Amino acid sequence: MAKSLQNSLSRALIGVTVLAVTGCFPAAGGIPEPVSPSDLTRAQADYPAVTDVELAQGRQLFIDRCGSCHNHSELQAHSKAEWTPIMERMGRKADMSRAETALALQFIVSRLRPRQ
Ligand code: HEC
């Protein structure tokens, strides 16, 4: 193999590796626990009308639609202010309707520590 081709191939490989290690893929968080009464209390601080059924639907959407391209994200890795635009982007990537995206976001917010 020509030396210059070899060089550019190894440069490409390094590039891919660096992206995989430092890249913007979410930290893996696994399948989240089922919705609990304390999740509902926390979520209602941000979304007064949200129900436990909606949180469970949001959890299911997150499980079904958010783990195909990358692992399920660690929910605590982002604040609510960060999750809102991320979910606009990822909801589109996951082919979710606005209503489905909103349900999944409410579920995520129910798992964030207070005052995030
Ligand atoms: C079609 C593939 C695909 C689907 C489906 C998908 N993602 Fe992603 N996600 C990506 C890619 C690619 C990136 C890295 C590039 C970027 O940030 O756009 C990413 C990045 C992320 C990040 C890091 C963003 C940042 O700014 O640090 C989070 C968090 C995330 N995804 C969560 C989700 C959630 C939650 C869902 C479900 C709604 C989801 N993803 C569905 C492909 C996908």
Image (spheres, rainbow, N blue to C red):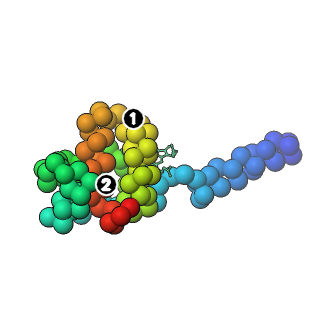
Measure how far apart labels 2 and 1 are at the Cα level: 17 Å
Left or right placement of residue 76 versus residue 58 in this view:
right
Give the crowd class for mark 2: few <14, some 14-19, many >=20 residues within 10 Å: many
How many circles with numbers are drawn on the protein? 2
Q: Amino acid at mark 2?
A: Ile
Sequence order check, earlier mark of 2 and 1? 1
Task: Say which element carries label 1.
Answer: helix
Say which residue appears at 39% left-offset and 46% top-offset.
84
Q: Residue 110, position in %: x, y?
A: 26, 58
| Residue 5 quadrant | top right
Question: Residue 28 placed where, x, y %?
Answer: 42, 60
Evaluate whether residue 74 shows in this view.
no
Is there any visible trace of residue 97 in the rendered image? Answer: yes
Q: Position of residue 108 (x, y in %)?
A: 31, 54
Residue denoted by label 1:
92
Give the answer, above or below, for where 38 lies relative to 107.
below
Quick check: is the Cβ at mark 2 less than 8 Å away from ligand 1? Answer: yes
Q: Which residue is mark 2?
A: 108
Q: Which of label 2 and label 1 is nearer to you?
A: 2
